[in-house]
Image: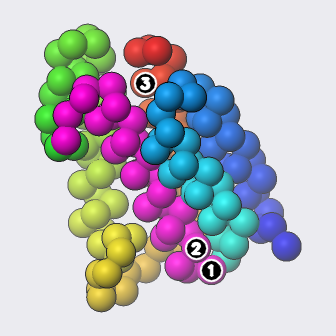
Amino acid sequence: MVAEGTESRADAIEEAITEVSTEQINVIKHLTQAKKQLQEISETRSRKDALRDSISALEAQLKYYSDTKKFEDAIKYIQTEYNIPRKIIGDAKMIWDLIHDKTPDVLHGCTINSDLSEAEALYWIDRIMALTKYLAREIE
């Protein structure tokens, strides 16, 4: 059974998938995986995986637009070359840092076990999807 409210989050991810170009294969793969993980959001590991795949999609998108290998370099490039407002593109770095600092076990192989409620996971996923869609609309 899908948790109540999950369908709308899956819709947000689906909308993000339709916003990015089909050339962004890695972005689409991460978003598709995040959508799948949301089906089991009541499970701690599934919500952490959904969050990880969402932030990985954003990372892949930034690297795609910038043709860079480092997340930080991608942010700098996009801000400069696409004239994206500092507060908006800075949100990508802020979200990245908070997720990795507060919930390091969203990463594979991390032995730390952090708490991540459904509400918090969905909050971060919503923010990431909003940013992903904004970047696709602004840059594509």
Residues at marks 2 and 1 touching, judged by CB atoms closer than 8 Å: yes
**x, y percent for residue 16:** 59, 35
**Which residues are the magenta region?**
43-69
Q: Is residue 95 visible?
A: yes
Q: Which mark is first along the chain, 1 or 3?
A: 1
What separation in Å lies between label 2 and label 1 (alpha carbons)?
Answer: 5 Å
Classify mark 2: helix, strand or loop: helix
Which residue is under mark 2? 46
- Position of residue 86 relative to residue 112, above or below, is above
Q: Nearer the viewer, residue 61 or 87?
A: 61
Q: Which residue is mark 3?
A: 135
Quarter the N terminus occupies: bottom right
Instruction: Judge by depth and name the residue closer to the eye, 66 or 130.
Output: 66
Residue 69 badge: none
Residue shown at 30% from the left, 72% from the top: 104
Magenta stretch, overall SS:
helix
Residue at screen point 72% across, 66% down: 39
57 in magenta? yes
Amino acid type, callout 1? Glu
Label 3 to label 1: alpha-carbon separation: 30 Å
Q: Name the residue that disc number 1 marks.
A: 43
- Amino acid of disc 2: Ser
Amino acid type at image mark 3:
Leu
Q: Residues within 10 Å of mark 1 (few under 14, many from 20)?
A: some
Disc tally is 3
52 is higher (above) or lower (below) than 44? above
